[in-house]
Amino acid sequence: MVYRIDKDILLERYRQLCVPVPAVTNMSVDEVAWRKRHSYVTNVIDADSRKVIWNHPGRDQSVLERFYKALGPEACDSIESVAMDGALPYIAATRRHAQYAILVYDKFHIAKKLNDAVDAVRRQERRKASGDAELSRLLETKNRFILLKNPGRHTERQKHMLDRLCELNEPIYQAMLLKEYFLQLYTYTDPKEAQDHLFEWGINAAVSGLEPFHDLMKSFFRKRRMIINWFTRKISSAVSEGINNKIKRLKRMAYGYRDVEYFLLKVHQHCGLLSPRTPQ
């Protein structure tokens, strides 16, 4: 009964505050799992107010197109920038409906993909290191966070382990260099210099012989314009990741949701315009 009362009240407030969809100038798009077995919802966040303004089950192109159609052509033309994780369905939907928006490949997700490539190299090398006890120990899964951690945050013990690992294994050393060299991209202020750095990184990744980085190079090359767009419009979907963490906490508090419509309303209540803290 409490669930039904709560849902009815939230639904009424949603119709008052979120219909029609609020106009947005700078936005971020991301997905989050609402239950196991690849059940996702897409969230659209106003990057200026840091609030969820729209969400819907699924994460394919048609889902985001629902948002743009609900927004209307005039409001879509007023969107200036969209930050996203490089998902092709989101890119296709945005290019189709928000033709004047600058698409920005989010820096947070790029760092995550670099970490994934480093971890893929670690897994490959661990399979090869069965005869070397010290190397196998350093490449264990429990030590993977040392490779993925920001270098400036390593403890002395972790620095020693990382240095020793790089001494023992050339591919790991190469992977770490490629990761750090790419991230130097964000120290530039001139887009042209950043673009030159990106192309040089791509050449190094291509000749490294590391398959995960070769695949990543091809993905980054296809989306190079979105990567460089960050230097003209420094918008990030980091706010989306913060909201995703709130949503995960919300799921844990409720021990999961079986009603996706209710889940979407609770996201609006905790992270959107239905929040009691949001000025009406």
Image (cartoon, rainbow, N blue to C red):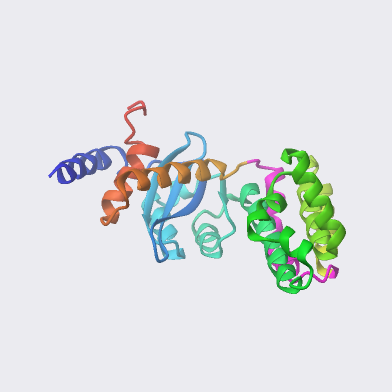
**Place of residue 111 in the rendered image (x, y in percent of width and height, measured from the top left):** 67, 51
Image location (x, y in percent) of residue 146: 70, 50
Instruction: Please give the name of the residue rendered at 74% of the width and 41% of the height, measured from the top-left corner.
Output: 154
Residue at horizontal 29%, vertical 55%? 260
Image quarter of residue 85 = bottom right
Is residue 248 rendered magenta in the image? no
Position of residue 110 relative to residue 218, above or below, is above
Residue 62 seen in the figure: yes
**Residue pushed farthest left?**
1
Give the image location of residue 265, x and y in percent: 30, 45
Taking the view exactly as shown, the residue that stands out farthest to the front is: 133
Which of the 4 image quadrants contains residue 124? bottom right
- Say whether residue 274 is left or right of residue 126: left
Residue 134 in which image quadrant: bottom right
Classify residue 276 as left or right of residue 155. Answer: left
Look at the image and give the residue range highlighted in magenta: 207-234
Q: Is residue 178 left or right of residue 273?
A: right
Q: Residue at x 81, y 42 (%)?
A: 190
In the displayed structure, would residue 116 be above or below residue 111?
Answer: below
- Residue closer to the observer: 264 or 229: 264
Residue 13, given in percent of the width and then of the height, sits at 24, 38
Q: Main secondary structure of the magenta part?
A: helix
Magenta stretch encompasses residue 216: yes
Quarter of the image with the N terminus in it: top left
The C terminus appears in which quarter of the rendering?
top left
Asked whether residue 191 appears in the rendered view, the answer is no
